[in-house]
């Protein structure tokens, strides 16, 4: 088996499941390495990975006949009562003749048996697109499938837990969309229920997959919406300025003396067995290229109930409290546009920070959460914060 780190291999549209203390990663088949079907990798630490096998032998015949797909995209995997259910997408670029199928196994590495169609779309059937499946469980233990893309927006459809397939006819309900002025660019959605705030959080990817991709979030009391951002704007409202809708969590950025992170997106959420939460997404080292790689980052929560994402790739270890906040920090401020954001050097003074909790402060209109975690084996203070306009700042302290 070939061992890899999360910086070194071609992973796109990733999701991770934990089973018996081992982590299994599935993703779009990028042919890195040469595979057929859905590539499966495993890790004991979320940092070092090894390729294991491929789920399915290419595109199942029924899915191929409908979609003409040559590979499988954006898989989702869940464990329901000991059965591993993998939802896969079959489509071609720019087409809405698409197919979400289900395959099942008794192990996260298979063998997987195709169970056929979950939902399929075409221009003759509807105006949206059946790709990018995500299964979410509501407060009552019922399951729903979130799916969709640029074409027609994001939909949610109730699922029968016994079969893993829809429990009603039709395509479900639209919960998010963007207008034609931005090419209706939304996809790769994932809904996470956070019991501490009793909200469902809709994470979505905006803009161009190859260069301006970025992650936004909104939340709802109900699994089927409405999903509102920090300003109360509905993700389904096409009249709102599409650059100002949704809380912008992560975009393209570059810290000083580090490689750029372009087009982060198509995220999933991993809740580890110890309760820690991670955002799992891909990014690019170069725009309009196949230089994409896995990113695993800690997901943190502000006291106002909104999430923020770590500026650092997960490097193992436990996050620790930061005692000394004063000093030089490299900050990245995300704004409405999708340009690459370069770090700025800011000196934070203790007297400018207004304490909210032991590790949360208000500074220049941002709620900032401070902690420290490993970066290249060195414990590094970092921060992430959010302002009332729905834009995030991330940063790390300069170590002397």
Image (cartoon, rainbow, N blue to C red):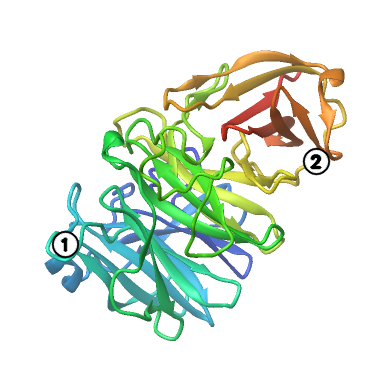
Q: Is residue 59 visible?
A: yes
Split into 4 quadrants, where in the image is the N terminus?
A: bottom left
Crowdedness of circle 1 by 10 Å Cα count: few (<14), some, many (20+)? some
Identify the secondary structure beneath mark 1.
loop
State the mark number for residue 320.
Answer: 2
- Label at residue 314: none
Q: Is residue 238 above or below residue 26?
A: above
Asked where in the image residue 58 lies, by quadrant, the reply is bottom left
Give the residue displayed 84% in from the left and 40% down from the top. 357
Give the CA distance from mark 1 to mark 2. Answer: 50 Å
In terms of depth relative to the viewer, which is nearer, 21 or 157?
157
Residue under label 1: 122
Residue that appears at 33% across and 57% down: 148
Frontmost of labels 1 and 2 is 1
Q: Quadrant of residue 208?
A: top left
In this rendering, the count of numbered labels is: 2
Between residues 9 and 320, which one lies in front from this camera angle? 320
Looking at the image, residue 241 lies above or below residue 316? above
Q: Is 337 rendered above or below residue 309?
A: above
**Residue at horizontal 38 percent and vertical 43 percent from the top:** 10
Q: In what quadrant of the picture does the C terminus appear?
A: top right
**Residue found 28% across the figure and 49% down from its top:** 31
């Amino acid at each position: 088996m070939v061992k890899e780190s999360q910086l070194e291999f071609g992973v796109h549209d990733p999701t991770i499941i934990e089973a018996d203390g081992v982590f299994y990663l599935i993703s779009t088949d990028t042919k890195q390495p040469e595979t057929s079907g859905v590539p499966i990798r495993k890790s004991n630490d979320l940092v070092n990975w090894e390729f294991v096998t491929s789920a399915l032998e290419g595109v199942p015949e029924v899915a191929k006949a409908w979609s003409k797909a040559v590979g499988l995209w954006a898989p989702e995997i869940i464990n329901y009562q000991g059965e591993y259910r993998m939802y896969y997408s079959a489509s071609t670029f720019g087409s809405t003749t698409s197919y979400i199928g289900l395959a099942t196994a008794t192990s996260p590495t298979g063998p997987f048996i195709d169970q056929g169609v979950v939902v399929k779309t075409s221009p003759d059937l509807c105006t949206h697109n059946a790709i990018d499946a995500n299964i979410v469980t509501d407060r009552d233990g019922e399951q729903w499938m979130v799916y969709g893309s640029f074409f027609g927006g994001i939909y949610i459809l109730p699922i029968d837990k016994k079969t893993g397939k829809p429990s009603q006819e039709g395509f479900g309900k639209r919960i998010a969309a963007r207008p034609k002025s931005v090419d209706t660019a939304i996809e790769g959605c994932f809904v996470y229920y956070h019991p501490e705030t009793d909200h469902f959080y809709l994470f979505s990817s905006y803009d161009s997959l190859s260069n301006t991709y970025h992650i936004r979030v909104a939340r709802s009391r109900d699994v089927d919406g409405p999903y509102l951002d920090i300003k109360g704007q509905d993700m389904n409202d096409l009249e709102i300025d599409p650059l100002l809708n949704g809380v912008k969590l992560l975009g393209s950025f570059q810290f000083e003396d580090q490689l750029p992170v372009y087009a982060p997106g198509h995220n999933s959420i991993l809740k580890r067995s110890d309760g820690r939460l991670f955002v799992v997404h891909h990014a690019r080292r170069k725009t309009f290229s196949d230089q994409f790689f896995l990113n695993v980052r800690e997901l943190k929560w502000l006291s106002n109930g909104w999430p923020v994402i770590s500026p650092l790739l997960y490097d193992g270890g436990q996050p620790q409290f930061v005692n000394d906040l004063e000093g030089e920090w490299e900050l990245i401020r995300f704004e409405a546009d999708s340009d690459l954001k370069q770090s700025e050097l800011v000196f934070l003074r203790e007297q400018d920070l207004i304490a909210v909790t032991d590790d949360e402060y208000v500074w220049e209109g941002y709620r900032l959460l401070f902690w420290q975690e490993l970066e290249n084996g060195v414990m590094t203070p970092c921060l992430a914060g959010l302002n009332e306009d729905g834009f995030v700042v991330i940063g790390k302290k300069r170590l002397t």
